[in-house]
Image (spheres, grey):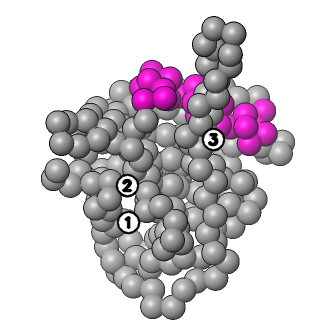
Amino acid sequence: MGVLYSHCKSPLFDNMAHVRGAMILKKRGKRTIIMAFLTILSLPLRAQNGASLADQYTNVDYGYSVLIPEHLRIRRSDPLAPNHGFGIDLSDKPPSYLWVDGTFYSEDFTVSEVPQVTIRGLQYRGAANIKLRNKVRIRLGGLSAMLFIIDYELKQKPMVSETIWALRPAKKDSIAIHYSIVLECARERFDQDSHIAEKLRQGWHLLPH
């Protein structure tokens, strides 16, 4: 059983105004400089014709591939949008959504700041009662990675954000890239859906460069 590639708009984007990235505020002397690496993901409303089936997603732009668990429909951004990764709608009500991403590392933030960057992104979206529950070191496709879990409320609904984040360092002939697998879901769905994020992590691989 393969995976249907679709350009449908995610209902979770409608309900949660999903943002890839976040915002950092840093003080430099008397000036406050806002450094953002946020992107509002907008997908077209209707599926395009000619959807294809596959068991693996490959992104040559950012050098990674992911084995997709069976029966899951992955959603990609519009062909004219940047090709960072894909999303998976796990549930509309209660909401649960996965996003797998690769992005050039701009060095506007350090690795240790990533959880705080995510918290600022949640604040930007209107989240409240934000708490960092856990942070551990893991591996992602041979890269050193961190996994952190954040509890928060959005529109008075208990939510959880789980992020797996890894950095591929720059080499002489290549730019540094950071990778992420992000699960955002209603708290009641977290235990079951975090297992899917773990399957994606296990099936995530770097492409040679």
As drawn, 193 above or below 36: below
Q: Read off the residue under disc 2.
A: 200
- Residue 46 image offset from top left, x and y in percent: 64, 82
- Residue 23 image offset from top left, x and y in percent: 62, 33
Mark-to-mark CA distance, 3 and 2: 18 Å
Cβ–Cβ below 8 Å for labels 1 and 2? yes
Q: Residues within 10 Å of mark 3 (few under 14, many from 20)?
A: many
* Name of the residue lying farthest toward the top: 29
* Tag 1 secondary structure: loop
Is residue 97 in the magenta section? no
- Tell me which label, 1 or 3, sits earlier in the chain: 1
Tell me which segment is drawn in magenta.
107-128
In the rendered image, which quarter is residue 40 located in? bottom right
Tell me which residue sits at (63%, 8%) in the image: 29
Q: Read off the residue under disc 1.
A: 69
* Tag 3 secondary structure: strand
- Residue 14 image offset from top left, x and y in percent: 74, 63
In the rendered image, which quarter is residue 155 located in? top right
Tell me which residue sits at (45%, 77%) in the image: 5
